[in-house]
Amino acid sequence: QVQLVESGGGLVQPGGSLRLSCAASGFTFSRYTMRWYRQAPGKERELVAGIIGPGSSTNYKDSVKGRFTISRDNAKNTVYLQMNSLKPDDTGVYYCNAFILGSDHWGQGTAVTVSS
């Protein structure tokens, strides 16, 4: 059974930093691309960043390039999202995602609020 558990969200002032973690289980983690999505209040869920399984290739939403870094530790079955220079527009619930054998799997999400 695939499980994804996010943590690390919270309230932070503009310009601050947070590191999100997603602990995965129930599948061969190292083989799969992992992604972070976010959903702001009243908006649709959007892709923020992704990291390929076997390698280290990454991709980012344009508005977070240079501020966010996605990484993974295959020994710990964990994917991270380091978020720096946070802006109020980064506020939302952040979800970890894995697309496995034709199905999307999601964690419960972790809330990030950027506000002074």
Image (tube, rainbow, N blue to C red):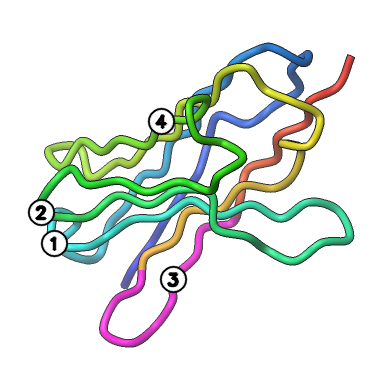
Give whichever of discs 2 and 4 has the lower sequence position: 2
Q: Nearer the viewer, mark 4 or mark 3?
A: 4
Q: Report the span colored magenta.
A: 99-108
Tell me whether the residue at label 1 lies in contact with that at label 2, contact meaning CB atoms closer than 8 angstroms: yes
Q: Alpha-carbon distance for marks 4 and 3?
A: 21 Å
Horizontally, residue 90 falls left or right of residue 8, namely: right
> Residue at coordinates 36% horizontally, 65% vertically from top-left?
98
Expressed as whole percent of the image width and height from the top left, the position of residue 102 reads: 33, 87
| SS for callout 4 | strand
Q: Amino acid at mark 1?
A: Arg
Residue wearing tag 3: 105
Q: Given this view, does label 2 or label 3 mark the residue nearer the observer?
A: 2
Task: Tell whether position 53 is magenta.
Answer: no
Q: Is residue 99 above or below residue 42?
A: below
Callout in the foreground (1, 2): 2
From this viewpoint, which residue is outermost toward the front?
62
Q: CA distance from mark 2 to mark 3?
A: 19 Å
Residue 31's disc number? 1
**Three-letter amino acid code of the residue under disc 3:** His
User: SS class of the residue under badge 2?
Assistant: loop
The residue that label 2 is drawn on is: 54
Looking at numbered disc 4 in the image, what kind of residue is underneath it?
Thr
Quadrant location of the C terminus?
top right
Residue wearing tag 4: 69
Badge 3 crowding class, 10 Å Cα cut-off, few under 14, some 14 to 19, many 20 or more, is some
Q: Amino acid at mark 2?
A: Pro
